[in-house]
Image: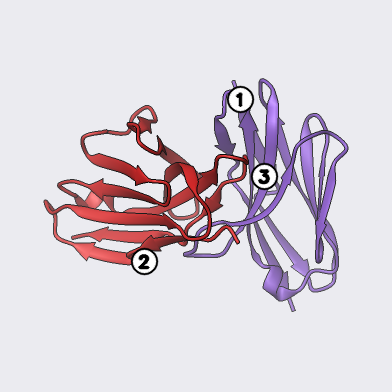
Amino acid sequence: GAVVSQHPSWVICKSGTSVKIECRSLDFQATTMFWYRQFPKQSLMLMATSNEGSKATYEQGVEKDKFLINHASLTLSTLTVTSAHPEDSSFYICSARAETGETQYFGPGTRLLVL
Amino acid sequence: EDQVTQSPEALRLQEGESSSLNCSYTVSGLRGLFWYRQDPGKGPEFLFTLYSAGEEKEKERLKATLTKKESFLHITAPKPEDSATYLCAVQAFDDKVIFGPGTSLSVIP
C-alpha cells in the first residue's frame, strides 16, 4: 500500500517553455501533498504544501507564479514549471499524506533538464 | 530554531559489519520522526515512523530507536544492497517537516 506515482520520470525542454509534472496517490486518498526539489548530493528542499481544494502554501523564496501547484482531487496534484530556465533543472519529488496519518509517502521523482 | 542533523555524513562498512547512524534534532514539540532510504535518482522510500521516546521499530536488518533528542538507525550485518542514503525527518506540532542532510552508506562486499 501507500504508492505514489509521478509522471513523467524525466523531461527535457527548451528554455522558455512550461512543463507539467503529475503526482498521484494510487491506493489512498491524499489530503495533503508536498513538492520538493533536490540538488545533487543534497537533501530535500520543500517547495510547497498543498491541500486538496485549496491554494498551495509556498516556502520562503519559492516563486508561486513560476511553480504553479494544483491539487484538484484527493489523488492528484500537479506542479507546472512556467517559462522554465536552465537554473530550474533539478530533481523534483512529490509526496502524499493521508488525512489519518503523519507519514509522507514519496513518488519516484521527475528529473527536469532545461536546455 | 528547529533543526535536524545527521552523522556521519558518509559511512563505509564491510559486509556484515554492524553500525549505527545518528539523527539529532531540536524541535518545539515532536509529533513524529521518520526514517527514509533513498537510492540514487529515486524518491525516498519510507522505513519507519517513531512517535515517542523509548519507541523502537525493526524491519529486517534495520532497527530504529528514539530518545528525546536523537534517533538511531542500527544496521545489523549489512549487505551491499543496504547501500543508500538514509534520511531522517522530524515533524513538529506545527506540522512542519524538516529533513536532515542524510547519511550516505556504502556496504562493501
Q: Residue at x 47, y 62 (%)?
A: A108
Residue identified by numbered label 1: B2
In the rendered image of this protein, does residue A17 appear above or below residue A98? below
Residue identified by numbered label 2: A9
Most foreground residue, B31 or A32: A32
What chain is tagged by disc 2? A
Q: Nearer the viewer, mark 2 or mark 1?
A: 2
Q: Colour of chain B?
A: purple
Q: Secondary structure at mark 2?
A: loop
Q: Residue at x 68, y 30 (%)?
A: B31
Report the side of B108 relative to B44 (left or right): right
- Inspect this view and state whether residue A43 appears: no
Number of marks in the rendered image: 3
Most foreground residue, A8 or B74: A8
- Inspect this view and state whether residue B44 appears: yes
In the rendered image of this protein, does residue B15 appear above or below residue B93? below
Residue identified by numbered label 3: B34
Q: For marks 2 and 1, give the CA distance.
A: 33 Å
